[in-house]
Amino acid sequence: MKVEPFHLERFYVDYEFSVGTNISASCGAVTTTEDILKHSGVEAANQYISLDLDYRENRGDEALRNEIVCEYENLNSGDIQITTGGSEAIYLLMRTYLEPGDKIVTEWPIYQSLFQLAADMGVEVLSLPLLAEEGYIPDPAKLKKLLLKNDVKMVVINHPHSPTGSILTAELQREIVELTEKHGALLLSDEVYWGVFYNKADEVPHAADLSENVVTIGDMTKPFGLGGLRIGWLATKRKDIIDRASILKDYTTMCAAAPSEFLAVLALQQKEKILKRNIEIAIKNIELVNRLVSDSGGKLSWIEPRGGYTGFVRLNLEGITVDEFCLELIREKDVLLLPGSVFGDPSSFRVGVGTKVEQFERGVSLLSDFLAGK
């Protein structure tokens, strides 16, 4: 099977670990093992040190699944399949649910694996555009037209959204759930940023709590800054989907890593504390970007994100592309932004507002200096 390069990840392979100041990352502020253990007590630390490193259960540790389902209203631990990050969750679902010739609808722009894995299998991908003038919110009327005109197997959404930070209202979320159910399409709701809402009033339920016709994806990476644990999950009342994902996992990673599952349980027990810290950091960084945009003299514009840890900034400069702008910034200031071309939007770049404030302040200051010379 021919595999299309993952443009975002290939860009990061080249630059993420060599550029001095990264202000493009999509995760919350990094959480350390020490952060987790010091708040969990001596007994937990001793258990971690003496943890056996044997194989783990394919479905995932029961204690971990029990912690995860605390977020859901209508699911139990049997409705959760632990995966190696959200990436494996997407892979397992796409490979076991879709067939060549099927059709799916995905929001656009969106994380590439949420459509590319399907496209590489011979699935037709239909786009539901998220437009800046509409606040990067999906239009249910446009979705309805796509569903009426096509035999759609799956609809893919992602909110809080990367790269734009847009969110859904509870009413719109329910409308999308009902539309997909009415037209016989499975709804895949990528909720890796669930819980990261800047205003408590904006919080919406997990889509999987609203219907059996929904699969949600979650992970420990984005909300908690724990990408190194590589813990994600699929959540759904559809037992057939969970069972098929479990079977395919035998051929991929078989099970999660014991230290990762153990630390994930402890982190989830402290999730309110970690989320509060990371959201406060993001709010401060958003203010920094607001000032940068305001002081740019029209060279930059953006729609302020309302959730997640990313924002999409439009570059309004003639004579230079966003890709050229980002590469020059690397060479001249050692600062990393993510060009929007990796999402199919060559007019914008992504900033990572979850980055620790000191690093983000440094990067924004260098970016401001660079922009002043343009």
Image (cartoon, rainbow, N blue to C red):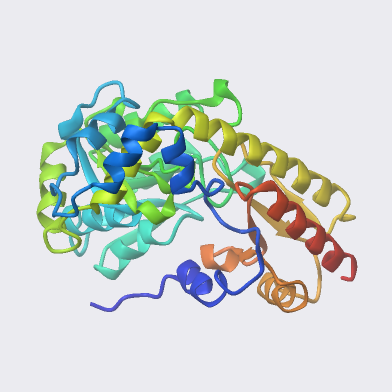
Whether residue 151 is visible, yes or no, is: no
Q: Quadrant of residue 336?
A: bottom right
Above or below, comparing residue 70 to residue 226 in the picture: above
Residue sitting at x 39%, y 31%? 41
Q: From the top left corner, tell me how far across and down residue 7 is, in percent.
A: 47, 71
Q: Quadrant of residue 136?
A: top right
Residue sitting at x 65%, y 40%? 281
Above or below, comparing residue 183 to residue 171 in the picture: below
Relative horizontal placement of residue 362, taking residue 141 as reference (left or right): right
Above or below, comparing residue 30 to residue 180 in the picture: below
Count the labels in the image: 0
| Viewer-nearest residue: 46 or 105 | 46
| Viewer-nearest residue: 143 or 59 | 59
| Viewer-nearest residue: 221 or 310 | 221
Relative horizontal placement of residue 67, taking residue 21 as reference (left or right): left
Above or below, comparing residue 300 to residue 20 in the picture: above
Q: Quadrant of residue 335?
A: bottom right
Q: From the top left corner, tell me how far across and down residue 371 is, in percent.
A: 84, 65
Residue sitting at x 70%, y 44%? 285
Q: From the top left corner, tell me how far across and down residue 361 is, in percent.
A: 76, 52
Quadrant the N terminus occupies: bottom left
Relative horizontal placement of residue 293, taking residue 98 as reference (left or right): right
Quadrant the C terminus occupies: bottom right
Q: From the top left corner, tell me how far across and down residue 145 is, in percent.
A: 40, 43
| Viewer-nearest residue: 242 or 275 | 275
